[in-house]
Image: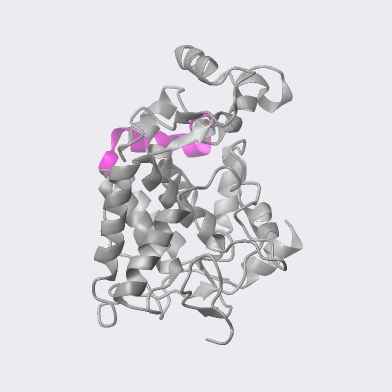
């Protein structure tokens, strides 16, 4: 573990905290949650994939320095932000949806709603608007004053990660193996690039051979989508119902049809297979576990100064 990650974990706090609560903006910006929901509805109409992209922002933000919108900060001459980190560059997208929500909130309630809370609300709405569960979110976060590309590189997993690595990573944030499998169900919606699966198709574990866990007909489909000479920015669906939040993702894993290695490994690894099997036949059980995981992740915080940014991409000017 890197020294930077150790320092971060020592300062991490988890669980319900006094300054995070449901209905946080009810007195100062009562329409905050409905404003974000309306923006997400418009995004769904424009491009259904964008909801999955926005939901992913919570994972990539909260795991790096807590849920503080550090992910949204653009690079500056003196700071390398997180957008170009290895796990994020050419992968994360739809930042403009958060910008749209922030602009609408600033018109309604200037200087009140944090970008960090927008990510939490929008992630919840992305799930609910695509057929998944809804839940009450705890709000009251501040936006960070800085970001760290190095911290993101040290924390965020790659699509090549196996179940053992993922269990260990999530445990550092007090998230159990069950939490990890349930949260991996976020891949029920959205797409991923061929770049993320080339080694799984053609050089699994450095063998020069495909992953033997891939179901043969699905392998043929992936070969056509992502041949060796493909533009690796070509995308494929993460599961068979990629615009609907359901438990099809887990059914696909049971059938050997996981798009990413980090997904399929959840079924091939005994410790996580039981949860994959469980969620593949019990959608309500998956929904319940997913909500619990999202709430735990949303509680990740780091004790550091913060503010309510006027623009999610930059810190506020010092003279304001």
Which residue is outermost to the right? 3
Which residue is outermost to the bottom? 319
Residue 260 place in picture, x, y as percent: 53, 32
Which one is nearer the viewer's eye here, 125 or 74?
Answer: 74
- Count of numbered tags: 0
Does 27 appear above or below 15? below
Specify the principal SS of the magenta part. helix
Q: Is residue 269 magenta?
A: yes
Which one is nearer the viewer's eye here, 40 or 66?
Answer: 40
Q: In this rendering, does residue 104 appear at all? A: yes
Residue 129 place in picture, x, y as percent: 26, 48
Q: Quadrant of residue 80?
A: bottom right
Which one is nearer the viewer's eye here, 103 or 122?
Answer: 103
Q: In this rendering, does residue 285 appear at all? A: no
Q: Is residue 237 magenta?
A: no
Q: Quadrant of the N terminus?
A: bottom right
Residue 4 place in picture, x, y as percent: 72, 64
Taking the spot 62% from the left edge, 18% from the top edge, the residue there is: 210
Which one is nearer the viewer's eye here, 139 or 276?
Answer: 139
Q: Quadrant of residue 226?
A: top right
Residue 79 place in picture, x, y as percent: 69, 66
Taking the spot 35% from the left edge, 41% from the top edge, the residue there is: 47
Taking the spot 41% from the left edge, 36% from the top edge, the residue there is: 276
Does 318 appear above or below 215? below
Visual colour scheme: one colour
What stretch of residues is rendered in magenta?
Answer: 266-284
Q: Is residue 287 left or right of residue 312?
A: left
């Amino acid at each position: 573990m890197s020294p930077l990650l150790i320092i971060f974990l020592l300062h991490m706090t988890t669980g319900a905290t006094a300054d995070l609560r449901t209905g946080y903006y009810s007195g100062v910006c009562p329409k905050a949650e409905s404003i974000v929901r309306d923006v997400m509805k418009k995004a769904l109409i424009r491009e259904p994939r964008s909801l999955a992209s926005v939901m992913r922002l919570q994972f990539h933000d909260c795991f790096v320095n807590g849920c503080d919108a550090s992910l949204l900060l653009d690079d500056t001459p003196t700071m390398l932000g997180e957008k170009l980190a290895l796990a994020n560059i050419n992968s994360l997208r739809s930042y403009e949806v958060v910008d749209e929500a922030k602009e609408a909130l600033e018109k309604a309630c200037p200087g009140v709603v944090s970008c960090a809370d927008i990510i939490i609300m929008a992630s919840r709405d992305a799930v609910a608007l695509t057929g998944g569960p809804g839940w009450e979110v705890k709000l009251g976060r501040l936006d960070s004053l800085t970001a760290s590309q190095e911290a993101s590189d040290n924390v965020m997993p790659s699509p090549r990660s196996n179940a053992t690595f993922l269990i260990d990573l999530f445990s550092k944030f007090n998230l159990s193996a069950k939490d990890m499998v349930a949260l991996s169900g976020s891949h029920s919606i959205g797409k991923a690039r061929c770049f993320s699966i080339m080694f799984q198709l053609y050089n699994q574990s450095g063998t020069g051979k495909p992953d033997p866990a891939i179901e043969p007909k699905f392998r043929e489909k992936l070969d056509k989508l992502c041949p060796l000479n493909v533009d690796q920015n070509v995308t494929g669906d993460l599961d068979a119902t990629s615009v609907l939040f359901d438990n099809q993702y887990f059914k696909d894993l049971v059938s050997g049809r996981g798009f990413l290695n980090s997904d399929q490994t959840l079924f091939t690894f005994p410790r996580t297979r039981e949860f994959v099997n469980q969620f593949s036949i019990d959608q309500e059980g998956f929904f319940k576990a997913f909500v619990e995981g999202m709430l735990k992740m949303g509680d990740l915080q780091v004790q550091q100064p913060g503010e309510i940014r006027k623009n999610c991409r930059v810190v506020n000017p010092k003279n304001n």
